[in-house]
Every structure is written in structure tokens, then in C-alpha cells.
Image: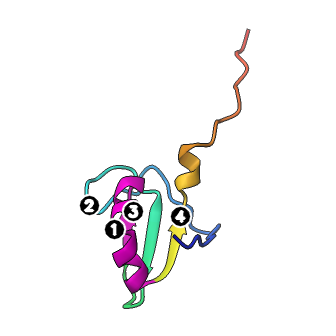
Amino acid sequence: MTTVLTPASPLTAADRCDRCGAQAYLRVVLTSGGELLFCAHHGRKFEPELKKIAAEIQDETDRLTTVPNAVEEDR
């Protein structure tokens, strides 16, 4: 997929997949002007069709494999 960086509008936990309701990691801006949100699974599943109708695709699936920094415990 084409990755588009849109720092002004990162996806949050409130953004849900339009197909199944899971957390969205892809935003597809359609050439017709609308947008669709997908979880990583459905983004991969519909990738060929999405590329045909997308003006841009914001892909944040790399967040799924990023390891957060360890948080020190307060003592």
C-alpha cells in the first residue's frame, strides 16, 4: 500500500474499522471525496480494490509491531 503521512490527523483508538469495528490503522481517502477506515486485516484483504478508488491511503499498521518504551515503576 502507499503510505501517506498525515501528522495533523493520526488515527486514534476511537477510530474503528468500517468493516468489523476493530481499531482502525488505515484511512483511505476516496477520489469521490469520502473516506473509509480499516483494521490491518481488512486493509490487507481489500488492498487491490482500495488502490483503484483511493486518492491516498494513510497506513499506520507499523504501530502494531512497535514496542513501547519501558515505563519505570514509581517506588
Tell me the distance, in whole angstroms, between the alpha carbons under discs 2 and 1.
11 Å
| Residue 49, x across and y down, in percent | 34, 77
Tell me the distance, in whole angstroms, between the alpha carbons under discs 2 and 4.
16 Å
Which numbered circle lies on residue 59? 4
Q: Earlier in the sequence, mark 2 or mark 4?
A: 2
Tell me the distance, in whole angstroms, between the alpha carbons under discs 3 and 1.
5 Å
Q: In the rendered structure, which amino acid carries the disc numbered 1?
A: Phe
Q: Is residue 54 left or right of residue 69?
A: left
Marks 4 and 3 close (CB-CB < 8 Å): yes
Q: Is residue 15 left or right of residue 63?
A: left
Q: In the rendered structure, which amino acid carries the disc numbered 4?
A: Asp
Q: Is residue 47 above or below residue 52?
A: above
- At 28% from the left and 53% from the top, the residue drawn is 21
Which numbered circle lies on residue 46? 1
| Residue 61, x across and y down, in percent | 52, 54
Magenta residues, start to end:
36-54
Marks 3 and 1 close (CB-CB < 8 Å): yes
Which numbered circle lies on residue 19? 2
- Front-most of residues 47 and 22: 47
Q: Find residue 20 and report its image quarter.
A: bottom left
62 part of magenta stretch: no
